[in-house]
Amino acid sequence: MRHCPLLSLRLTTPRLELRLPSLEDLDELADRALEGVHEPGFMPFLYPWTDVAADELPRALIRHHLGVLGAWRPEDWTANFMVVFEGRVIGSQAISASHLAITREVRTGSWLGRAWHGKGIGTEMRAAVLRFAFEGLGAETAVSSAFVDNPASLAVSRKLGYRHDGVKIQVVQGRRRIDQRLRLESDQFTCPVPVEIRGLDACRDQFGVQGLG
């Protein structure tokens, strides 16, 4: 897009394409949310967005993603990449930062439709945004977190080289949860898959790192 080059940004791996959402992508992402994101009775998210009536969930999800994109500022942004596998949107991989040119730190979060769990896709999609952050944007650290009773997410972090960075006690749905903080330094990251980044030069200024990377 000439007037919004962010929407032409692409990260590609052997199996996946990551891109910012079109309206059609969001419609498909809502289908994945309705089909299920996690086991019943278990909440992996700090904000329990999946705990919404089925007739409201698609609209809430689409409004959220459009709001995040509309609130984008170079000094404070969140890129909610759509994860596309075999031509289908199957989940979302987020990366965000505040004052990245100063902090050199990004945050990540993600989810996948349940049908695609356990296939190594979670590792591949997070590896893509880490390569984007470290080599494309010049970030020096990446942080994430997962509840200690979410071994699948913690395993992805372990594979990619994150180290424990303390814990924080959270309250989710009226319950005490232990949130494991994780940190990855750029010089400790070895990307497990090739990642191609296309379209960054045209929108680098929108990440607040013009001249870096």
Image (spheres, rainbow, N blue to C red):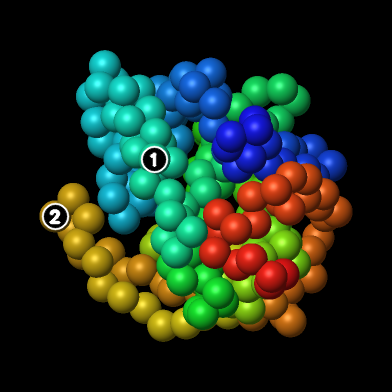
Residue 116 seen in render:
no
Gap between marks 1 and 2, in whole Å? Answer: 31 Å
Q: Looking at the picture, does residue 38 appear above or below residue 75?
A: above
Image quadrant of residue 141?
bottom right
Tell me which residue sits at (75%, 25%) in the image. 86
Is the Cβ of the residue at disc 1 closer than 8 Å to that at disc 2?
Answer: no
Check disc 1 and report the residue beneath it: 70
| Closest to the observer, 90 or 94 | 94
Image coordinates for residue 78, horizontal then vertical, percent: 46, 52
Q: Residue at label 2? A: 174
Mark in front: 1 vs 2:
1
Where residue 145 sits: x, y (%)? 45, 66
Q: Nearer the viewer, residue 91 or 118?
A: 91
Q: Secondary structure at mark 1?
A: helix
Dot 2 amino acid type: Gly
Q: Bin the neighbour count of mark 1 within 10 Å (Cα to Cα): few under 14, some 14-19, many 20 and up.
A: few
